[in-house]
Amino acid sequence: MTDPVQGLTGTITSPIRAAGALGEVLVAIRGGTETYLARADEPIAAGATVLIVAVHPGRLVDVVAWIPLTKEN
């Protein structure tokens, strides 16, 4: 069974301090929330919203910074 979090957004709870370093992301899924190890190509601060672009074994996900579109942008 594949993990259905690819394509979802989440919130960084433990910062990704450098490219390729690990942080943690909180994802709303299955009627609750779950945490995953997260890595990115750039540092991402705690509290930032991210998009999950790939899922790997061991609850590891690749993320990118996500800025949702609003009327202002």
Image (tube, rainbow, N blue to C red):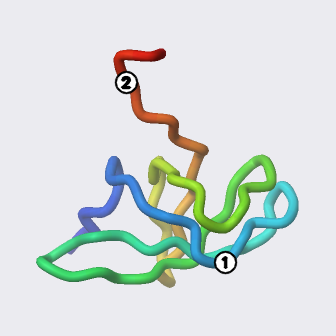
Residue sitting nearer the eye, 56 or 37: 37
Q: Residue at x 35, y 16 (%)?
A: 71
Q: Residue 12 or 23: which is nearer the viewer?
A: 12
Residue 29 horizontal side relative to residue 20, left or right: left
Q: Amino acid at mark 2?
A: Thr
| Residue 17 at x, y percent in the picture | 84, 66
Q: Eyeballing the image, is 66 above or below 38?
A: above
SS under mark 1: strand
Left or right of 31, for residue 66: right
Pair 2/1: label in front: 2
Q: Quadrant of the N terminus?
A: bottom left
Kindly identify which residue carries mark 1: 14
Which of the 4 quarters of the picture holds residue 5?
Answer: bottom left
Q: Secondary structure at mark 2?
A: loop
Residue at left offset 20%, top offset 82%? 32
Residue 45 on image: x %, y %: 72, 61
Q: For residue 24, which quarter of the picture?
A: bottom right
Q: Amino acid at mark 1?
A: Ser
Q: Which residue is mark 2?
A: 70
Q: How many residues crowd around disc 1 within 10 Å: few (fewer than 14), some, or many (20 or more)?
A: some
- The residue that appears at 44% across and 82% down in the rendered structure is 35
Where is residue 25 shown, x and y percent of the image? 52, 71
Q: How many marks?
A: 2
Quarter assignment of residue 31: bottom left
Residue at x 45%, y 53% (from the top left corner):
52
Disc 2 from disc 1: Cα separation: 26 Å
Mark 2 and mark 1 lie on one chain; the one further toward the N terminus is: 1
